[in-house]
């Protein structure tokens, strides 16, 4: 998870594909781990908040359109 968060913290631009890959990997982790992913939330929440604020960015928009279960999991179990 630390490596994935490091990938998200990098600059956008040319590394946008790397960030998209990180989002997809995190999505897979949430699906596989279910509630077990909650142990990562303290370190992941800032990145999620930034992504939700920047939802218009293409990679993040694609991620959320393909991974609605990810967003719904967090909205239902974490943010509400």
Image (cartoon, rainbow, N blue to C red):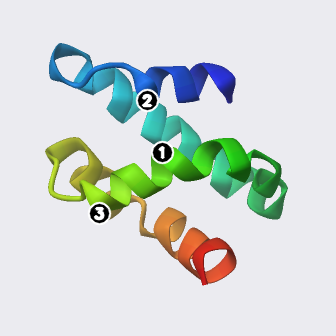
Tell me if label 2 and label 3 are in contact, CB under 8 Å. no
Q: In the rendered image, which residue does mark 2 sit on?
A: 8
Seen in the picture, residue 65 relative to 78 is either above or below; the reply is above
Seen in the picture, residue 12 relative to 57 is either above or below; the reply is above
Residue at mark 1 to residue at mark 2: CA–CA distance = 7 Å
Residue at mark 2 to residue at mark 3: CA–CA distance = 18 Å
Q: Nearer the viewer, mark 1 or mark 3?
A: 1
Tell me if label 1 and label 2 are in contact, CB under 8 Å. yes
Please tell me whether mark 1 sits on a helix, a strand or a loop. Answer: helix
Between 45 and 3, the residue placed more toward the observer is 45
Q: In the rendered image, which residue does mark 3 sit on?
A: 65
Of marks 1 and 3, which one's residue comes earlier in the chain? Answer: 1
Q: In the rendered image, which residue does mark 1 sit on?
A: 47
Q: Is residue 47 left or right of residue 4?
A: left
Residue extending furthest toward the top:
14
Of marks 2 and 3, which one's residue comes earlier in the chain? Answer: 2
Rendered residue at 68%/30% (across/down): 1
């Amino acid at each position: 998870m630390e490596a994935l968060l490091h990938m998200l913290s990098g600059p956008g631009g040319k590394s946008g594909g790397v960030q998209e890959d990180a989002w997809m990997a995190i999505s897979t982790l949430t699906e596989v781990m279910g509630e077990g992913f909650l142990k990562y939330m303290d370190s992941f929440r800032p990145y999620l908040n930034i992504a939700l604020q920047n939802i218009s960015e293409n990679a993040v928009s694609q991620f959320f359109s393909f991974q609605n279960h990810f967003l719904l999991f967090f909205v239902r179990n974490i943010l509400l």
